[in-house]
Image (cartoon, helix red, strand yellow):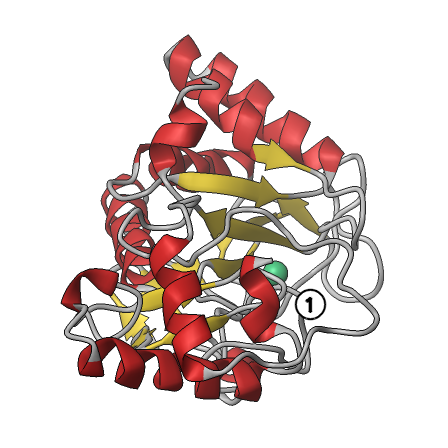
Amino acid sequence: MWWSVVNNSSMSARRALSAAAVAALAAGCAELGVVGDGTTVSWGPPNEGVLVDGARLPLEGEGFVVPPRWAARGTQWGADELIDTIAHVGRVVSAAHPGSRLVVGDLSIEGGGKSKHHRSHQTGRDVDLVLFAKTAAGKPIELTEMRRFGADGKTVGGGEPLVFDAERTWTVVRALVEAPGPGVANIFIYAPLRDLVLDHARGSGAPDAIVDLAGQALAQPSDSAPHDDHMHVRIYCSPDDAGCSDYTWRAPPKKPRPIADEEDIAAELAERPRIGSMLHFRARW
Ligand SMILES: [Zn+2]
């Protein structure tokens, strides 16, 4: 199976990738395109992969900010396409809602792979976004910590009572759907909040096609937390990253295959079909 080289740990995957790079260079196989192509490379599935030559999101930029909690974790590493997507959404937010900023949580750790806080977020294609909130009086505010929202869109738990801001959230969701690049694969969010966002979208006169695309991306995941305090955004693999998988790996083998030698890995990478292409998914839309 193609992911056999990531079967033990992220470190072994990194070693295998460097081994493959060396083997590819030695064989003069520049077209391999998996490593060292001058851009970031997402490799493997979101929950069992790595990020090679990752790009780092600045802690602050036009229309976005990383609050101290997440800045301290050093989890600002992503694929170029994810960094570009966040920058795009930030620009849209600041144009549509002057003074508002997208509040960004974790992307990936440097190099990707497993991290303390997430099962996915391994290949630089996942980012958590703090939800937008308003005061009870309707004043938009910027959250620097995640707050949980109930099915009625009101915060639950202690702290100042706040209301989910469907308007600014829709700005973000629409910007994600319309962002240039490989496209947004998933926007995980608590189902009642999804409904509030889509209701707002329809009420604001957004084009049906855009609302439909957003509706396909927005979902409450069935196999993890309900995402009632943040949105988890995943973008599709860049078609340039041949070893990137859009599919979550759900059943890792108990006894992984031993790491292959360098020539086997290089041959495997060269033969592996490109499974990350956006074209594959566009066909379903
Ligand atoms: Zn997440």
Q: Is residue 100 visible?
A: no
Label 1 sits on residue: 119
Q: Nearer the viewer, residue 164 or 26?
A: 26
Tell which of 29 and 170 is nearer to you. 29
Q: Between 220 and 270, which is closer to the camera in this rendering?
A: 270
Q: Residues within 10 Å of mark 1 (few under 14, many from 20)?
A: few
- Residue 21 visible within the image: yes
* Image quarter where ligand 1 lies: bottom right
- Would you identify the image quadrant in which residue 33 lies? bottom left
Q: Residue at x 43, y 10 (%)?
A: 208
In the image, taking residue 130 as reference, residue 150 lies left or right, namely right
Residue plotted at (71% across, 51% down) = 227
- Quarter-wise, where is residue 138 in the image? top right
Residue kind at label 1, given as amino acid type? Arg
Q: Pinpoint residue 15: horizontal percent, then vertical percent.
A: 46, 88
Badge 1 element? loop
Q: Is residue 12 left or right of residue 29?
A: right
Pinpoint residue 68: horizontal percent, then vertical percent.
Answer: 50, 84
In which quadrant will I find the C terminus? top left
User: Could you tell whether 61 is left or right of 3 in the image?
Assistant: left
- Percent coordinates x, y for residue 54 in the rendering: 33, 75
